[in-house]
Every structure is written in C-alpha cells, then in structure tokens.
Amino acid sequence: MRALIRILAAVLVMLGAGLASAAGAADLKEGQDFRVIRPPLMADRERIEVVEFFWYGCPHCFDFEPVLADWVKKLPADVVVRRSPAIFPNNRWTPGARIYYTLEAMNLLDKFHSEVFNAIHKERLRLEDEKVLFEWVAKKGIDTRQFTETWSSFGVQSQLQQARRTTLAAGVTGVPSVMVHGRYLALTPGNYGEMLANIEHLIAQVRVDAGKK
C-alpha cells in the first residue's frame, strides 16, 4: 500500500509540473513576449531546438553569453541549444559570422568562441579588419594558413548564405534573439532572467504542441 501511495504521489507531482509549465506558456502574450514564426522553420527532429541569434560585436550578446552558458548546463536532455550568427541585408555583421563559421569548420569554436567576444569587447580589437583578425589568429596560435583558406572556402560562404536566409525567415530584428524549435521567437524583455523564463515557457509550449507531458 505504501509503495502504491508513493507511486501515486510521484505521478501527481509530475502532472502538477506539467500543468504548471503549460499554464506558464499560456501566460505569455504574443507580440509582447514572443512572435510566432510563420511558416515555421526546420528544427531538430529528436529534441527541442533552441537557437540563439547573435553578433560578436553586440555588447548585449557579450553580456548574455555567460548567462546563457550557465542556463544551458541545467537544461533537460530533450533540449538542444545551437547558435546562429545573425546577418542582415546590409552585411555589416558578415565578418563576425564568417569568423564563427571558420572556427567551427576548424573544430576550434568551443575553444575560441568566448575569446572572440573578449578580443572585441575587452581588448577593443577591430576583428572585422582582416589584417587585425589574421594577426590575432596568429597570436592565438591558430594555423594562419589553414584559417585564411577556410575563411575563403566555399563551405563557409555557403553557411553565410544560409545564415542570411535564416535570419530573415525567423524575423530577427535585433540580437540577442532566441528561436524555440523553429516556431517561436522570444522577444527580449527588461532583463535576461525574464528572457530565459520566457524561453522555458516556450519550450513547455512546444511539448504541449507535440502532446508531450
């Protein structure tokens, strides 16, 4: 009997958590807390995909980076977080996106992603200038020849094209912006804590949309 009571209690706790998440998602207001992406974009088929749109030169993205990193560590296994450099039609942010995809192609992104932010916002280096960038690359011990070849490669150019299309299709107008499973774009409120709370509610909504508890 006691074992049955414990099982029933556990079930009630899980049901309560699910209802609370669904209620939290329902409390969000479209146009104020999020926008619906129409038509929805492709997303991970196995997990709920959260995509951060950013620009290395953005001071808000620089501030958001450690907050997001801590939040990612606490996410459940059914959620995956990816980054996507934002590129607008004026192409001003293209050099930053190109740095990102070059490092990614060289399997150096985990090591140098934060260092690019630091170089721009702490050391005040103008990494959009190729001369300054390549000098920084050499200083960091990165193979300069491989970096410059990758920088100009067809693969990186293709990813830049895709980033432009994704930025436009998601309706991104500023950064940092966060897209949840290709369906919702979280709008930035007064602080990052509120933004992450909104994202968690939208993740819960994706579960509800899929009929998951």
Image (cartoon, rainbow, N blue to C red):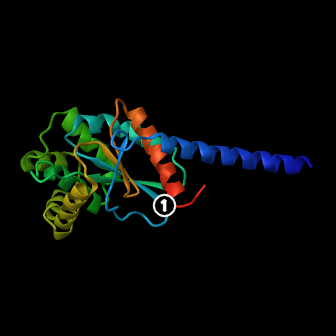
Camera-side residue of 129 and 34: 34
Q: Amino acid at mark 1?
A: Arg
Camera-side residue of 70 and 144: 70
Horizontal arrangement in the rendering, residue 127 relative to residue 205 (left or right)? left
Horizontal arrangement in the rendering, residue 146 relative to residue 79 (left or right)? left
The residue furthest top is 190
Camera-side residue of 21 and 178: 21
Picture residue at 8% right of the left edge, 46% below the top: 129
Picture residue at 48% right of the left edge, 55% below the top: 206
Percent coordinates x, y for residue 78 in the rendering: 53, 57
Q: Is residue 78 above or below residue 140?
A: below
Horizontal arrangement in the rendering, residue 47 relative to residue 94 (left or right)? right
The residue furthest right is 1
Q: Is residue 191 above or below residue 4?
A: above
Percent coordinates x, y for residue 157 in the rendering: 16, 65
Which of the image's four quarters has the C terminus?
A: bottom right
Mark 1 neighbour class, 10 Å CA radius: few under 14, some 14 to 19, many 20 or more: few
Residue 199 in view of the camera: yes
* Residue at disc 1, secondary structure: loop
Percent coordinates x, y for residue 167 in the rendering: 23, 55
Q: Mark 1 highlights which residue?
A: 47
Camera-side residue of 178 and 18: 18
Residue 70 in view of the camera: no
**To which quarter of the image does residue 37 belong?**
bottom left
Picture residue at 19% right of the left edge, 33% below the top: 123
Percent coordinates x, y for residue 101 in the rendering: 24, 58
Q: Is residue 208 above or below residue 23?
A: below
**To which quarter of the image does residue 104 belong?**
bottom left
